[in-house]
Amino acid sequence: MSGQASPDVLGHGPPGGRSARKSHALELFRGLPARYDLLSAALSFGQDPRWRRALVRAVSPGPSDTVLDVATGTGLVAAELLAAGSAEVVAIDQSAEMLGAARRRFAFAGASDGARAAAGSVRLVQAEAESLPFPADSFDALTFTYLLRYVDDPPATMRELARVLRPGGRIASLEFGVPGWAPARWAWRLYTYYALPALARGASREWAAVGRFLGPSIAGFYEEHPLPRIVEYWHTAGLEDVVVRPRSFGGGVLTVARKARPAAAPGGTGAPA
């Protein structure tokens, strides 16, 4: 179905026993989809769309590639992947409300994203990153956005993401970061802890909750999982050539790698490319 989502969001929803972290994430995003794209761009001063485009460029999808977009939200990255030339995108999110917004995005073929996506197709699946409903080695490339702060076990989640990626396949992530340069870090803290909550209150009650949550959540995540440790999670998952590219003075973090190919057996040539 060219440029449009499958008419039904396929359900592989989370099991009943959710952790407090995951329950909070689902509740946090439940009321956001209606104006998510506009407000996420405005509250990031236009940086969020730029970062997402950089994420797509990092995996450079080809015309025959099938790409998995994890934590797709309203489908922003999925639409960019199709526009960049992917033959097929499978986009997953654990939030039914976010997937509903993504379904509406792709349902309107005349909308800008739908028109740009006309060369390929997208399939929407409700699923969790920690337990993907796909066989091993299924995808040529994989993207994920603002995910690791919302999972209980980032190393295990990285292993699961790597599992479904084909050997040699490209993987890239976008996360918020904490700038390392002191003046930028001071400005980041001032904005995320004070200005952002005030601005978000003017948007809606739901965005006010996000505004209060975001700065402490990002800072707390990196206290528990410093960036070098996160890179190690990628390596341990079987990913190699891991490159970290700070964006906007470190307010965003783009990480890129590829899945290692199996080592050649003694006297053999290893798995074919």
Image: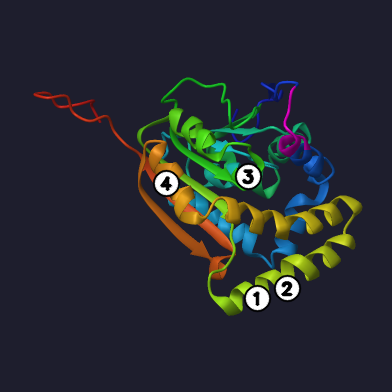
Contact check, label 4 and label 1, Cβ < 8 Å: no
Contact check, label 2 and label 1, Cβ < 8 Å: yes
Which is more N-terminal, label 3 or label 1? 3
Mark 3 vs mark 2, foreground winner is 2
Distance CA(mark 3)–CA(mark 2): 39 Å
Circle 3: residue type? Ala
Which is more N-terminal, label 1 or label 4? 1
Distance CA(mark 2)–CA(mark 1): 6 Å
Q: How is the image coloured?
A: rainbow
Mark 1 vs mark 3, foreground winner is 1
Q: Give the residue number, with chain letter if any, for mark 3.
A: 115
- Residue segment shown in magenta: 17-23
Please report the residue visible at 39 percent of the width from the left and 54 percent of the height from the top: 243
Indicate whether residue 22 is drawn in magenta. Answer: yes
| Drawn side of residue 208 relative to residue 41, left or right | right
Q: Give the residue number, with chain letter if any, for mark 4.
A: 232
Vertical comparison of 139 with 253: above or below: above
Residue 190 - label: 2
Which is more N-terminal, label 2 or label 4? 2
Indicate whether residue 97 is drawn in magenta. Answer: no
Q: Describe the element under mark 4 as helix, strand or loop.
A: helix
Distance CA(mark 4)–CA(mark 1): 27 Å
Which is more N-terminal, label 4 or label 3? 3
**Quadrant of res 169:** top left
Circle 4: residue type? Glu
Mark 3 vs mark 4, foreground winner is 4
Q: Describe the element under mark 1 as helix, strand or loop.
A: helix
Q: Is residue 191 visible?
A: yes
